[in-house]
Amino acid sequence: MTIDPPRLLALSLLAGLLACGEPPAPGAPADPPADPPADPYAWLEEIDGERALDWVRAHNRTTAERLGAQPLFAGLYDEVLAILNASSRVPAVTWHGDHLYDLWKDDAHPRGLYRRTTVAELRRDEPAWEMVLDVDALAEEEDVPWVFHGMRCLPPEGRHCLVELSPGGGDAGELRELDTETLAFVEDGFFVPTAKSSVSWRDADTLFLGTDFGEGSMTGSGYPRIARLWRRGTALEQAETIYQAEPSSVWAAASRIHTDAGDIDLVEDQDTFWTTERWQLVDGELRALGLPPSAVVEDGYRGRLLISLQEDWTRGVETFPQGSVVIADPAALRGEKGTAEEGTVEVLVAPEEGEVVEGVRATEQGILVTVLDDVRGRLYRYQPAAGRGWNRREVPFPDNGALSVSAVHDATGDFLVLYESFLIPPSLYFVSAADLKPELLRRQEPTFDASRFEAIQHWTTSADGTRVPYFVVMPTGMEHDGERPTHIFSYGGFRNSLKPSYSGSYEKLYGTYGRLWLERGGVFVLANIRGGGELGPAWHQAALLENRHRAFEDFEAVAEDLVARGITSPQRLGIEGRSNGGLLVTATMTRRPELYGAVVAGVPLTDMRRYHELLAGESWMAEFGDPDDPEDWAFLRAYSPYHNLEAGRDYPPIFFFTSTRDDRVHPGHARKMAARMEELGYEVLYYENIEGGHGGSVTNEQLAYRVALAYAHLWNELGGP
C-alpha cells in the first residue's frame, strides 16, 4: 500500500476539494419566533442523499478555497501533523496479561498499528514493540475502511480477547476474537457483525452479549435491548436470552465483574441516560439490587461492589451522601441475611469540600481513587484497615495537573498513570503496588516553549450568583490591554469534566494549542461550566432539562470576565465546542452574539425539536428533555439554535465541522444550521469529513486538516496581537 507523504496528501485532498428586528437586551434571548410550517432543510438529514452530498461537496470546496488555500493554513497543517506523528508521543497503553498494548498512528500507519510491549521495554530509550494487528493492511486486504475501536480481554491472563473494528469510524463496530498467544484471529471463534454492541467475557467459552439480533432487538435509541448468554460453538441466534428491556429504554446489558474473591454477574436496564435498574444473576436467576437508580457501579473488590452515588441514599437509619463511594456486599443489596462480613454497606470515600471523585479502579492490593480537587488531579489508594475502616495513602504527583490510571496489572496490582498539565507534556509513570512511588517511563518532548507561559485558575460569578471556575493559559506577565486573541473551549454537559491538559482540547490533540495558538500570540481558556462533572454530581444536575440555560449563562459569564480583566475584547474572542459543546456555542451565539468574534462548532447538536428522532438522540432526553412534551419543548425552544436564528443579529463568523459517518450526532444538525444561516445572509464555513464517526476524523492527516482549518478560521477572524 503506497502512502503519500503528509504534505502531498494534504495538497491532493485540497486539490480534490477545489475540483469537485431589534436585538434583545444582553443576557436575554429574543422572543422565539413561531415554528415554520415545515423544515425547509429536512432533505439535509438524508445522510447519503445525492442532493445532500452535493451540498456537502460544494461547501467543502468553498472552505478549501477560503481557508485551505491560504499560506497560513499550510503552516498550521504542517505543524499539527508533525505533532500528531511525533515519535516521542506517549503511548496510550492498556494492560492485558503481561503485555502493554497500544494503537500507534504515524505517516506510515495512518489507520494505526496495534502493537504490544512490556514495562521492562518501556524503561529503555528505544523499546521493542511486537506487532499485533496492522489496521491499514487489513483495511486494504478486505477493502473496508476499518477503524480500530479497542480490545477487550478476559482477565487475568488476557489471552482471550475481542477486537472491535468499525467501518468508517462510527460507534457501530464488528467484533472478532483474537488469541494473544498466536496473535491471530481465532478460526471459528466468536464473531459479531457490525452493530452497536455490548459485550463482556464471562469465561473463556462464554460471553454476555447484547447486539442487533434482528427486528425488535434494539431500543429506540439504537442500542441493544436484549442481554444474552452466548456459548462457544453455538450460533449467534441460539444465544440464551437473560433479560429483555422495553424499547423505550436506552439499553440493556449483562456483564461479569471479576474479583479474586468471587465473580459478580450483573444485568442492567438503563431506562434513561442517568437511571439504571440492576439485578445480580445468581444460579440463573435475576435478583434485584436495591440501589438508587442514579448510582453507578464502578468495579468490584474482593467479592463486593464499588458504587458511586449521584444523590443522597438513605438506607435504614443511615444516609450515604451524594458524591461518596460505598462498598457493598451484593447479598446486602439483595436484602438477604448475611454475616457481618458479607452483608454490609459502608462508605469508602467521603469527599471533602472542593473534592470530586472522578474514577475508581480496584486492584488486588487496594482500590485506586482519582479525585478532582478544584479541578486539579489527586490519586489515592485505599486498603482495609486492621479491624474496621480503610487506610488512605496518596500517590504523589505534581500539583495543578490532570492524571488518570491508564492500566492495571491484574495479578500484581502494579499500575500505570498518565499525568499532564497545561505546561507539562503527557508523562507515563509506572507505580509499584509495593511502595506507590511513581517512576517516569516516558515523557513526550515539548511541542512549545512552556517557559514563556503561565496557567492561572480564575473564578467568576454567573447570572444566578454561582461561582464558576475557568483556566487561562497566557504569556507570563502579559499586559491586560484587551488586545489578545483568545480561544475559549468548553462543554458543559453529560457529567464530562474538562481538566488541565497539555493539548487544551477535548480530543487531547497533544501540543496543538501551544504551537498553533499560544506561540503565535493567543490566549487559551478552558471553562468548567455547569452541566459538566468538574465540581461533582450537583454541578451536572444544576444544568439539566429546564435549567440548561445555566450552562449558557456560566459560559457567558466567563466571556464577560475575560473582557473585564482586560485579557481580551469581544471582537478578539473566539469560542469552540464539540458535540454537546457544539450546542453550547451555537446556543450562546444566538443568545449573545455581541460577546464573540468567531465560533467553531464541531459535530454539534442544533435542532432541539428533532434531536430525539435522529440516530442516538432519543437516549439523551434525560439530559435535555422530550421535545414532544409541550412543557419540555417550551424550554427547549427557548434556546434551540436552529429555531432561534434571526436576520439582522450580526452573528460572528462560524466554522462548522462534522462527519458523514457520525452515527451518534446526526450530521444533519450542522448541515441544516449552516444552510439556514446562509439563507439569512451570514458568513459560514463548513467542512464534512466522509469518515471519522463522532470524533470527526480517522487518520492523523484527516485530523490535522480539520484542526488547521479551525485555527485558520480563528486567526483570520480574531487577528494577531
Image: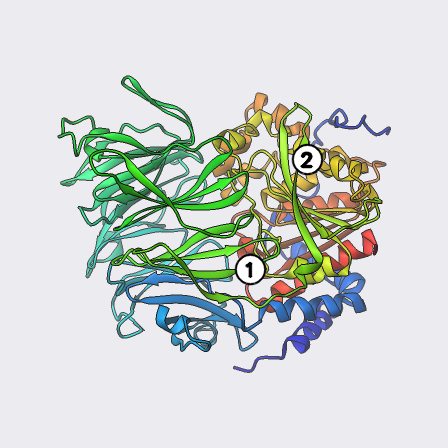
Label 2 element class: loop
Residue at the extreme bottom of the image, as rendered? 2
The image position of residue 552, as x and y in percent, is 66, 33
Residue at the extreme top of the image, as rendered? 317
Taking depth in this image into account, of 423 and 674 the one nearest to the observer is 423
At 58% from the left and 22% from the top, the residue drawn is 630
Q: Quadrant of residue 288?
A: top left
The image position of residue 459, as x and y in percent, is 66, 35
Taking depth in this image into account, of 450 and 239 the one nearest to the observer is 450
Q: Quadrant of the C terminus?
A: bottom right
Dot 1 or dot 2: first in sequence order is 2
Foreground: disc 1 or disc 2:
1
The image position of residue 157, as x and y in percent, is 24, 62
Question: Looking at the image, what colour scheme do you see?
Answer: rainbow
At 58% from the left and 68% from the top, the residue drawn is 445
Amino acid type, residue under disc 2 in the picture: Ala
Instruction: Classify 10 Å Cα crowding around label 1: few (below 14), some (14-19), many (20 and above).
Output: many
Viewer can see residue 107: yes
The image position of residue 104, as x and y in percent, is 48, 69
Q: CA distance from mark 1 to mark 2?
A: 31 Å
Q: Quadrant of residue 48?
A: bottom right
Label 1 element class: loop
Q: Which residue is mark 1?
A: 692
Q: Which residue is mark 2?
A: 38
At 76% from the left and 35% from the top, the residue drawn is 560
Q: 158 above or below 127?
A: above
